[in-house]
Amino acid sequence: MADERARYKIGPNLWHATAPPPPQTAALQAEVTADVAVIGGGFTGLSAALHLAEQGVKVVLIEARMIGFGGSGRNVGLVNAGMWTKPADLIASLGKEPGERLLHALGDGPALVFDLIARHEIRCEAVRNGTLHMAVGAEGLADITDRQAQWAGFGAPVEVLDANRARQLTGAEGFAGGLLDRRAGTIQPLAYARGLAHAAVKAGVRLFTETPLTGATRRGNDWVLKTPAGSVTAPKVVLATNAYGTLVDGMPWSAPTTELTILPYFQFATKPLSANVAATILPERQGCWDTGMVMTSFRMDQQNRLIFGSIGRLDTLATGTHRAFAKRSLTALFPQLGDVDFEYWWDGRIGMTTNALPRLHTVAPDVLSVSGYNGRGIAPGTVFGRALAHHITGGTYAMPLDETPLTPDPLRTVKSAFYHVGAQAKHLIDRRF
């Protein structure tokens, strides 16, 4: 795995350093057949492959790099319920029946994730004590109060905490309150992805890594998917590449990425904290994010590392700015930390749609794609993977999202650049005064 990390220029990423190993895989070097071909070895593709195989379907999954190379190995690790969009806004965007269908499916998303973890004995630092949406100022408190009222209308166990209680559960200074969602929790995201891969292989999935899709041709009712040293022939295809759909130059069916504004997101992880300091920070190990204009997140891992994230890309020019901002932020939130020393840092891509909701498309005959998780990859990816599997086989779980025409966003490149530059500018000055 060290060789693969070097080959793909994966830097000091905590998740790669601490995840159990993936199943042994190799590049495809033959012509193989399947009932369903899955493109992409992240949460969605692995969930689809696993749930298809459990129904007796013959599945081949190809991944251009390694399992969890994309967002699944760069995620914050918060297993949140629902989408970032408020329930009322989601229903206004999709309509009452489809909106409520999606809300119920994704509201139950963490339950599916933690059930799979338990059923397949996935070692991924799973903690299900909820997540906390932290309120920045009076405006943030009003926002989470509104979210609580809307979710309560669906019977969700969500609770607004006052500033005192929020401080007790986080140890953090400066928040006006927090929204505790007891459906949710945290995991080591790459370990979860690798665990799904092990479960999929055990269920019969043939899984090939370092196998990019380079071409696709229709032959009768089948698709012939070309790779550098082989091919997969299958009548049905699941496209599960999301924000990394342009990773391979010239890859077929990259059109769904034209709907996505790429929001870069970085994370820094401290060295393991001493036991006495660690005990004062997130004692119940909830994961947190805030209502700030430029969102930040923080959580702990099993080895007592404190992980801080925010919007931005760790390129040559921006890394120093974001690192300094992360240090200032952690010192302000947790004065007991003293001088902060980072052991790991990494970044990834969030695929944002214009309405902040995922998209389901038939991009070609019998080729299904879901993308645009808007920062909520773990539970929605798992839910949509299962739903795609049952949609293909006519199973019991309804697809939680209606298909829509593919609608490219002509401003996505401009917006992506704005997020990157704007976050860097804000982090340059934030918490200096």
Image (cartoon, rainbow, N blue to C red):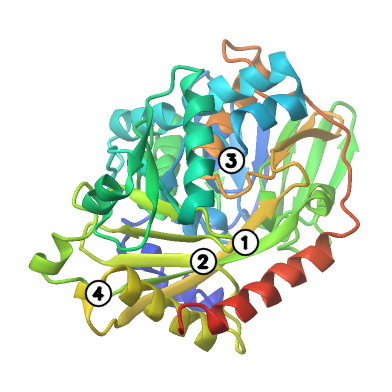
Instruction: Tell me the CA gap for discs 2 and 1.
Output: 12 Å
Q: CA distance from mark 1 to mark 3?
A: 17 Å
Mark 3 vs 2, N-terminal side: 3
In this view, the mark in front (4 or 3): 4
What is the number of the mark on residue 272?
none
Name the one closer to the observer, 412 or 168: 168
Mark found first going from the N terminus, 2 or 1? 2
- In this view, which residue lies farthest toward the left? 276
Q: Secondary structure at mark 4?
A: helix
Return the residue at label 4: 335
Asked whether residue 34 is in view, the answer is no
Q: Residue at x 63, y 47 (%)?
A: 374
In space, the residues marked 4 and 2 are separated at their CA atoms by 19 Å
Residue 156 figure quarter: top left
Q: Inspect the image, locate mark 4, and give the three-letter code of the amino acid beneath it.
A: Pro
| Residue type, numbered disc 1 | Arg
Near mark 2 (Cα within 10 A), the count class, few <14, some 14-19 or many ≥20, is many
Q: Which mark is residue 45?
A: 3
